[in-house]
Image (cartoon, coloured by chain):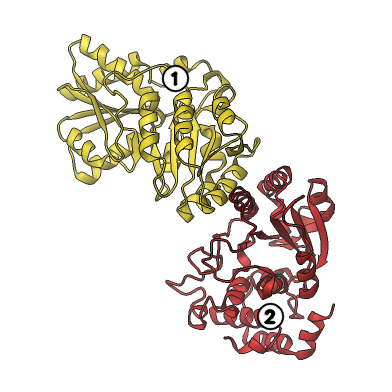
Amino acid sequence: MRRSFVNTLIELAECDPRVVLLTGDLGFMVFEPFIERFPDRFFNLGVAEQNMVGVATGLADAGFVPFTYSIVTFASLRAYEFIRNGPVFHRLPVRIVGVGGGFEYGTAGPSHHGTEDVAVMRALPGMTVIAPADQAQAATALRACWDMPGPIYLRLGKDDHTIVPGLDGRFRLGRAEVVRHGDDLAIIAMGAIAAEASAAAATLSARGIEATLVIAASISPAPVDDLVEVLSRFPTVVTVEAHSVVGGLGSLVSEVVAERGLGCRVVRCGVRTAGDGTGGGEAYLNHRHGLSSDALATTARDALAGLRA
Amino acid sequence: MPAADAAPFGCAIRRLVLEQSKRANVGHIGSCLSVADIIAALYSGTLAIGDPDDPDRDRFILSKGHAALALYAALHVRGWVSAAELDTFCGDASRLGVHPEHVVPGVDFSTGSLGQGLSVAAGAALGARLLGSERRVFALLSDAECNEGATWEAIMFAAHHRLANLIAIVDLNGQQALGYTKDVLDLSPMAERWQAFGWDVHTVDGHDERQLTAVISDLDTTSGRPHVLVARTVFGRGVSFMEGQIRWHYLPMSDEQYRQALREVDDASCAAALLTP
């Protein structure tokens, strides 16, 4: 989604001189087209994410629409209090862009795994939180939201190629997108891991289990009405996120079930355990945490079987 | 206008700080007295602020937000915070808390968490430059705030981008919450440290309004390096039993202490001494 992000940002910057791009010394082979086009609107702040958000706050107050860019963990966690006390408290249009949710930086290790960002961003009143599922949806979301009042957290995947079948780049703020219809259970996915959820739905279908697949990219504001509609129709719902099961999509769905008094069972697929010091690539780590398409299909099938038993 | 209107600005701030701290029964008095003359110098003409809503006004960020009462006092003297509102300080549903909120007319940024103000000020200064505005951005930091690593991120950023329209003032009172800075996390030599990071450094007497005003007015804020005034101050300045005493970071005043403190700041010789160059 990085190339999709920078290409869309160039479009926006062409139309609006308020758009400026700040990076925490990241974006090699990504930002060059932007830098070439707008050398005076690009700032590498060095390895200093807190200052980057502080500077963005001052720029936003001066009337600019600054985008800050770093890896998910550094963009969100390292600078968190600056985000809270700056753009959130002052309701300023700073756009915090984190790249590489979940285990996308696989072998880089746990310091680079983005597994708590949505939880902490979702806790900030007035923060718009968007986690697109693929690059086409990322571009749509950026075009739809870039000029909104208040701050935005945009969680981008690294993958510039994988497309979630049926999504067709759709994005609506405060809404969820249904990309597959089935009667046996619902799967709700957030972020780039949606591709695994989509593959799991296909695997289940081959085994005679038909799933409805919902993509929730607009996390705040939450797509509450769309979720209620889906959750009311299924006794079993599986949530999929490359993120802690605490505070992210699984929590959001569970909150909707509890607050609306719905009767469905929520099975949260996501990160539940801390690392043990051993690592590996993204696919390996996703599988280890139950997020590969095979693991998700097994979890969904077991959940259905458990319910029937 | 306040009762102390006739007194020099710094003494007016001191009196208001004492009155409101006593009325609200809160602490942070020593910090407010430490910066009273710096804020007086800024708000008695240095800051180009005709109207706190003018987009091209100079900006001021009280990065050491715990001295907000001194800022409220100055905003009151300037007529932007009414006497009635000042009397709500630290009350329920008041806009005037221990740390400043940007909803208050004249407060440009909310602060309270140390080490964040200079970054925001640097962004505001960069924004002014990009817009071609000649407005300046001032940030008042405590010395202990320089314990925060993020302060040095901002210091490096401002020097790298040669933000000449950024003026930091460090309230060098040598104290922090649990002790003297030399004992907690030694910051000396403060001036040399900023200089080594590429700033234009001026060491000044932080209780000399005239010197502060003169030094600031001589700064080239259109080109060159960002500026810092390392302002030597005395924590609790103007109230003898508070000066240099750590406990006045915390304590509210007893009735007797309040009477004595008022006597001291109202003393004409005190006012004269404070203004002697």
Q: Nearer the viewer, residue B57 or B82?
A: B57
Whether the residues at callouts 2 and 1 have beta carbons within 8 Å, the answer is no
Q: Quadrant of residue B100?
A: bottom right
Q: Residue B50 falls in which quadrant of the image?
A: bottom right
For the residue pair A226 and A15, the one nearer the viewer reads as A15
Q: Is residue A264 left or right of residue A64?
A: left
Please give the chain letter of the residue carrying mark 2. B
x, y percent for residue A299: 29, 20
Q: Badge 2 is on which residue?
A: B9
Colour chain B appears in: red
Residue B236 vs residue A39, the one in the foreground: A39
Chain containing mark 1? A
Residue A238, percent from left and from top: 27, 27
Label 1 element class: loop
Vertical placement of B221 versus B277: above or below? above
Amino acid type shown at disc 1: Asp
Q: Quadrant of residue B271?
A: bottom right
Residue at far top of view: A206
Percent coordinates x, y for residue A73 in the rendering: 53, 34
Position of B108 compared to A244: left or right?
right
**Would residue B56 be visible to someone looking at this image?**
yes
Q: For the point 44% across and 30% down, which residue is it?
A: A8
Colour yellow, chain: A
Instruction: Tell me how far mark 2 sits from mark 1, CA to CA.
Output: 61 Å
Q: Amino acid at mark 2?
A: Phe
x and y, in percent, of residue A278 in the image: 55, 18
| Residue of label 1 | A160
